[in-house]
Structures are given as C-alpha cells and as structure tokens.
Image: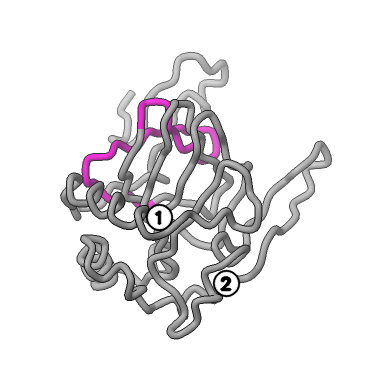
C-alpha cells in the first residue's frame, strides 16, 4: 500500500479505513526563527506583563502582542480568548462560547514589546499571512483545553514545550517541538491541546485569516 507522506498507518485500529492517520491538518511552514531569541523575548515580556486569564479561565493565560489600534480594552478578558464552539455535555449539541472578534482590526503591534524579537517575528509573518490577533498563550502543567473548534486556522510557534504537550485535531495527535519552526493548524475542526508535562507550555499563536486547507 502506498501512503501519502502526511499519513501513517495505525495498526491498533480495527477498521481498515481508520488505520490511516492524516496529519495534513498540521502544516509545517518554510519559515524558521531563532528559538534562543524567541525564548529570550518571552523572558523579557513576562518581566513586565502578566498573563490574562481570559476572564477567569483555569490553566490558561494570554499575552496579546497586537490590538485594535488605540484600544487597549480590545485585548482584555473574554477578548483575550474570542468566540469558539464546543459540545459540552452528553447531548452532543454544539454551543458557542465567549465573544465575537473582528480579527482584521487587530493590526497594531503593541508598543511595549517593540524592542523584543517578537516585533521582527510579527513583521515577517504579517508580510506573508493575513493575521488577526497575535498572542503568547500559556497552558499550565497537567491541563487541557476543551474539545472545541475556532473560526479560523491558527499559526503556532512553540517557544517552551515538553514531550507531553500534544495537540489533537479530530483523532490525530501531534507534538510540535520548540525549535523555531512555524506550523499552521486547522483549528476550524474540533481539536484540543493538552500539557501532560510538569512545566508550562508556551506558544506564540496567531489567527490566520487567508490560509486554506484542502
């Protein structure tokens, strides 16, 4: 049997059709950044800015690198998270959570962080992609997100991670290493992310408004 390079056989599944795991919802990009500079920039920022918990969400934190021009309120509370859809109980009924975000308006890089490496990263990314919010996201140890879907794909640059950090889209799990690589993930499908390690998981995450998955 010939396999696509983005697919692998999972022999533990009984249904032959389901034995092919499709990794095409995790797409590694050709851009590469300096992981040491990313980690140094993160350490710079956390000395002057605390994570926003998105209005009291446990095990979650966000530091926004962009905002609506002149509007610091656009990155606080629920706006640090944004709308998503989930199936929270045994009924399987989909419901929406949090507030709608006009991602296109988030095009001002916050001045407090302009002297960090993240400004260079933002300039490179925004020249290649149409971006919405750009955030540094925290996932605390031994915690998980809800099973949910988002309005658009997300760009990830892992900054601090460990082997127990996985993202799951549909029934496919992948670990994205902190080596300066850039990934775009298909967050329009149901997914979650969990940190099974004992240190924080830190990713730079951007909403990507013009990226199409086949």
Q: Observer-nearest residue: 126 or 45?
A: 45
Residue found 68% across the figure and 49% down from its top? 86
Q: In the image, 102: left or right of 134? A: right
Task: Tell me where residue 214 appears, x and y as whole percent.
Answer: 41, 55
Task: Tell me where residue 128 appears, x and y as whole percent.
Answer: 25, 69
Determine crowd level at label 2: few under 14, some 14-19, many 20+ residues with C-alpha closer than 10 A: some
Task: Tell me where residue 30 appears, x and y as whole percent.
Answer: 19, 53
Secondary structure under the numbered disc 2 in the rendered image: loop
Q: Badge 1 is on which residue?
A: 136
Q: Badge 2 is on which residue?
A: 101
Res. 114 image quadrant = bottom left
Q: Distance between the residues labelled 2 and 1?
A: 17 Å
Secondary structure under the numbered disc 1 in the rendered image: strand
Q: Does the magenta stretch include residue 118?
A: no
Mark 2 vs 1, N-terminal side: 2
Find the residue positioned furthest to the bottom.
70
Determine crowd level at label 1: few under 14, some 14-19, many 20+ residues with C-alpha closer than 10 A: many
Q: Observer-nearest residue: 120 or 182?
A: 120
Task: Tell me where residue 9 appears, x and y as whole percent.
Answer: 40, 22
| Residue range (magenta) | 162-184
- Relative to 79, say whether 35 is above or below: above
Residue found 57% across the figure and 41% down from its top? 59
């Amino acid at each position: 049997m010939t396999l696509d390079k983005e697919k692998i056989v999972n022999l533990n599944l009984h249904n032959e059709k389901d034995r092919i795991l499709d990794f095409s919802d995790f797409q590694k990009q050709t851009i590469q950044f300096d992981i040491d500079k990313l980690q140094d920039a993160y350490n710079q920022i956390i000395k002057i800015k605390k994570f926003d918990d998105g209005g009291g969400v446990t095990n979650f934190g966000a530091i926004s690198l962009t905002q609506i021009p002149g509007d610091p309120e656009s990155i606080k509370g629920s706006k640090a998270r944004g709308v998503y859809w989930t199936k929270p109980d045994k009924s399987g009924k989909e419901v929406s959570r949090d507030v709608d975000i006009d991602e296109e308006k988030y095009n001002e890089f916050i001045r407090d962080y302009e002297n960090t490496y993240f400004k260079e990263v933002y300039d490179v990314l925004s020249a290649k992609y149409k971006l919405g919010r750009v955030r540094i996201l925290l996932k605390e140890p031994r915690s998980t997100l809800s099973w949910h879907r988002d309005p658009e794909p997300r760009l990830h640059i892992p900054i601090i991670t460990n082997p127990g950090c996985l993202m799951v889209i549909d029934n496919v799990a992948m670990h994205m290493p902190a080596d300066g690589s850039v990934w775009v993930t298909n967050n329009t499908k149901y997914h979650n992310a969990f940190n099974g390690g004992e240190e924080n998981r830190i990713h730079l995450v951007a909403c990507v408004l013009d990226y199409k998955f086949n």
